[in-house]
Image (cartoon, rainbow, N blue to C red):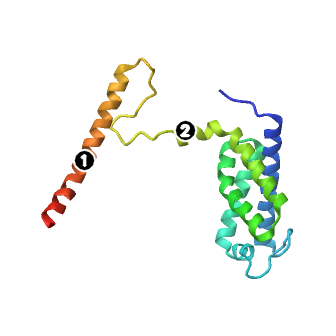
């Protein structure tokens, strides 16, 4: 079931995509042409250290490029938001504590939150309960599916017995020391 984005969510997708595409292009210009569109950082600042750590700066700008293109082209935009969210978090901290650009913080944070909420259904499986490494995968069960519930109980029981049997030698060796 594909949900259609609301207008403000689509606008947020394009705006965040443009912001990160600009950052990626700016980074490429800095790396390859020594051109600073946004101004050169002061020596010793956090931003300058990142810029002069070429392997990290190049990787960061590559992720920004992939995430920005994903949002602008609407190709797997949930993945684009997932890639850009950690960068947005660090960027927001940088805006608040280093530059005191509260408007930029508010813009990036709100756009990212809108998109996280818009694509929440794509992230939900990542946050579901992880079936502990049983021998058979746990399938979705109906409320009346007693056979599936019995299978799940058996798998959990086996898992608990394995854990207890793994702990038993440690407990015995601890007793022999005392």
SS for tag 2? helix
Q: Is residue 178 left or right of residue 96?
A: left
Q: Quadrant of the N terminus?
A: top right
Q: Residue at x 65, y 39 (%)?
A: 120
Query: In this view of the protein, which residue sits in the foreground, 63 or 42?
Result: 42
Q: Sequence-wise, which precedes: disc 1 or disc 2?
A: 2
Query: Is 160 positioned to the left or the right of 46 in the image?
Result: left
- Say which residue appears at 85% left-offset and 68% top-offset: 38
What residue is disc 1 on?
Answer: 164
In the image, 56 versus 81, the foreground residue is 81
Residue 98 locus on image (x, y percent)? 76, 71
Residue at point 74%, 66% (across, down) = 94
Label 2 Cα neighbours within 10 Å, binned few <14 / some 14-19 / many ≥20: few
Question: Looking at the rendering, which quadrant does residue 104 occupy?
Answer: bottom right
Residue 162: where, in percent of width, then height? 26, 45
Q: Quadrant of the C terminus?
A: bottom left
In this rendering, position of residue 90 left or right of residue 22: left
- In three-dimensional space, the C-alpha distance between marks 1 and 2, rounded to whole angstroms, equals 29 Å
Which mark is in front, 1 or 2?
1
Q: Position of residue 31 (x, y in %)?
A: 75, 71
Q: Residue 8: which quarter of the image?
A: top right
Q: Which residue is mark 2?
A: 125
Q: Residues within 10 Å of mark 1 (few under 14, many from 20)?
A: few
Give how far across and how far down residue 67 sits, in percent. 71, 52
Q: Residue at x 74, y 60 (%)?
A: 92
- Mark 1 lies on a secondary structure that is helix
Find residue 136 and report its image quarter. Answer: top left
User: Do the residues bearing badges 1 and 2 touch, measured as CB atoms within 8 Å?
Assistant: no
Question: Which residue sits furthest bottom?
Answer: 43
């Amino acid at each position: 079931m594909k949900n259609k984005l609301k207008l403000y969510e689509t606008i947020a997708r394009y705006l965040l995509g443009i912001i990160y595409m600009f950052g990626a292009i700016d980074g490429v210009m800095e790396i390859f042409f020594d051109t600073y569109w946004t101004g050169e950082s002061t020596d010793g600042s956090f931003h300058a250290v990142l810029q002069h750590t070429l392997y990290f700066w190049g990787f960061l700008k590559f992720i920004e490029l992939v995430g920005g293109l994903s949002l602008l082209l609407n190709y797997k935009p949930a993945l684009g938001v997932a890639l850009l969210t950690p960068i947005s978090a660090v960027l927001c901290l940088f805006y608040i504590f280093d530059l005191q650009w509260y408007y930029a913080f508010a813009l990036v944070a709100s756009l990212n939150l809108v998109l996280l909420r818009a694509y929440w259904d794509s992230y939900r499986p990542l946050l579901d309960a992880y079936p502990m490494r049983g021998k058979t995968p746990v399938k979705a069960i109906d409320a009346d599916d007693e056979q599936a519930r019995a299978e799940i109980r058996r798998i959990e029981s086996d898992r608990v017995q394995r854990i207890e049997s793994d702990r038993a030698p440690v407990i015995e060796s601890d007793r022999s020391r005392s």
